[in-house]
Image (tube, helix red, strand yellow):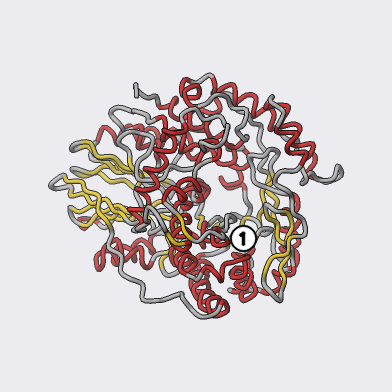
Amino acid sequence: MSRWYLTSSKAAAVEASSANERANLRVSGEVAYDGCYGRTYFKRAIATSNFVDLGEDGFICSAGTLIYDGQIGAEALRHCYNAFIEGGAHAIQAHALGHYAVAVRHLNALTIFTDPLGAFNLYYFNIGSFWFASNSLSTCALALPQRKIDANKLLVTALQNSMPGDETFYSGINKLFGTQLVQIDTGNRTFTVERIPESADARSWHVGTVQEAVDKYSEEVRFVFRQLTAVGPIGLFGTGGMDSRTILAALLDQQNTPQVMYGVGNNSLTDFDFSDLDLAKRVAERHGLVFQQLDWSGDQPYHEEKLIQLFQRYGFQYEIYGSPQSFLKALDGGISPYPALLLGGYSPGFTSAKPWDSDQTRFTLDDLINDGLHPQARADRDRCVIGKSSYRSTFAAGVKSSLEWAGIDYPDTHASLEMFVKAKLFLLIRAESRLLNLVNEFGNYIAPFLTKKLYDPLVDIPLKFRSKDEFQLRLIDALQPDLLDFPFCSSYGLTRANRKTFQLIRDQVIPKKSFAKRVVGLISNPVLRASAKMVISPFKPKQDHPAMQLRPRDPAIIAAYGHDVMNDPLGREWLTSTASLTPKELTRIRHYLNGINTLGYSDR
């Protein structure tokens, strides 16, 4: 399902329905009884059933991707409803697999919750007797009687990729954590937010050796991937990096032959690398897999009218990769054949940050906050954010709220490395979930290692086993050893696995502060600086590389969006200039400003 909304107001339901109709969404189900009105919508590219009407007993619906015992759609929802009757929301979370937002009505009780990690978005507000809930922030905001913007939270959301905590930049709209549920009594018209009781997991991951941990974890991986492969044909995005390579290893271990896809853009808004592309092709060819190179190039910067159209169609989540039309068309049925399930590697469990390799042994709460704070907002950096103190306070408050709802008792001082890693990875979940929320608007998408069954062990495994990528490399070896024959593409360049030590050997290490980069940093004009970066880029392909026909558009993006942001009242309130912002950062800010201006907002 792409979206659903539920509300106590018939008038709000009519307005939300009109907005979703303008977004070209197809209705899959409808709720209309005293005290509760709403609609559910099919995904844009496939028509997986996502609403089950149970007559007088109630209904169940979901957005996102929900798998139950290898089944998806109506049958999975019926199993979920029966599990809910037996054990409530926790019973579904403990058994279902995926990223989802579920609403279950049983008699007069309406219960709303997400997947246990809260990777899938669910927004809500409750004003007196008027409540509204949806997985679309723009739909939720449209229903507000009065839209007030918190400027600091909006900037944090744009720069950090997400706002930590349960509050959004719209006053009154909250975002549900996976440990929470919304409980509504439609008869008595009560609305409460409660914590979902979590039963203790009796399994321990504190085993004696790294190989024991790998053997134990690989069984969990096989259990999950048996369910994934039971759904139907699978499409996998990329195989050049370690995370998507790990997913491919698990698929091949199940004798599954996924369709391998790799998107190539024409600007830095799209994550791609020529070495990564070549590796993806080579890996697919070795295993006889269908490989499809996707065109994700775009004609950004977009004019105002185009930005408004994109927002009205996709809401705030449309900013991924700068929303190139070819990317959206590929997701909207352009991939051929279109997979029953799409998989991707994004997950903080295998983050490139690798906090477990830190030499520091004790951490304060300030250490955690400063670690996650965007470089543009750090007090020790001469960057463009004006109100650094207010920005940090807003971010810190969200961090504390997140830790509380996660049940992470992080001390102000002397937190262990294990506690720091656990907290840092949890805070990364929302930032890593942006792509999965957008892709689920079109098809069924799961990041396997961002499901609780595979994520939790990665947090609990002794950190010494995670050092230098040893655990992940051993896992790939256990599932499909010949995948270690190929190099890996990372932010450090090409690396390869040492089969004796199971550690990565870095064949090409790019200094963070090379002479050329220092020279480029001295260029004050953002357009000239972007052009210079392209000239000195160590990843610049040879002139005869077929991808060279894709012309970079970064200078135009920086110039146009920089102008637009600094002409907006909020932009001038936030920033001294846009000169030090990357194209991605600048584009996200521009898109968020477009969204709030399209809906309109009152004085803050």
Check the picture and name the quadrant holding the C terminus.
top left
Place residue 325 in its image quadrant.
top right
Q: Number of callouts in the render?
A: 1
Q: How many residues crowd around disc 1 within 10 Å: few (fewer than 14), some, or many (20 or more)?
A: many
258 in relation to 14, above or below: below
Is 83 displayed left or right of 512 in the figure?
Answer: left
Residue at 36% of width from left, 61% of height from top?
Answer: 77
Residue 152's spot in the image, x, y percent?
42, 32
Residue furthest right as drawn: 544
Q: Compare residues 13 and 370 and report the one nearer the observer.
A: 370
- Which residue is drawn at the image coordinates 49% and 66% (left, top)? 458
Helix, strand or loop at label 1? It is helix
Percent x, y for residue 255?
A: 61, 73
Q: Nearer the viewer, residue 34 or 468?
A: 468
Q: Residue at x 67, y 72 (%)?
A: 502
Amino acid beneath label 1:
Ser
Res. 5 visible in picture? no
Residue closer to the observer: 430 or 547: 430
Q: Is residue 292 left or right of residue 27?
A: right
**In the image, what residue occupies the spot 30% across and 65% down?**
198
Res. 250 image quadrant: bottom right
Mark 1 = which residue?
244
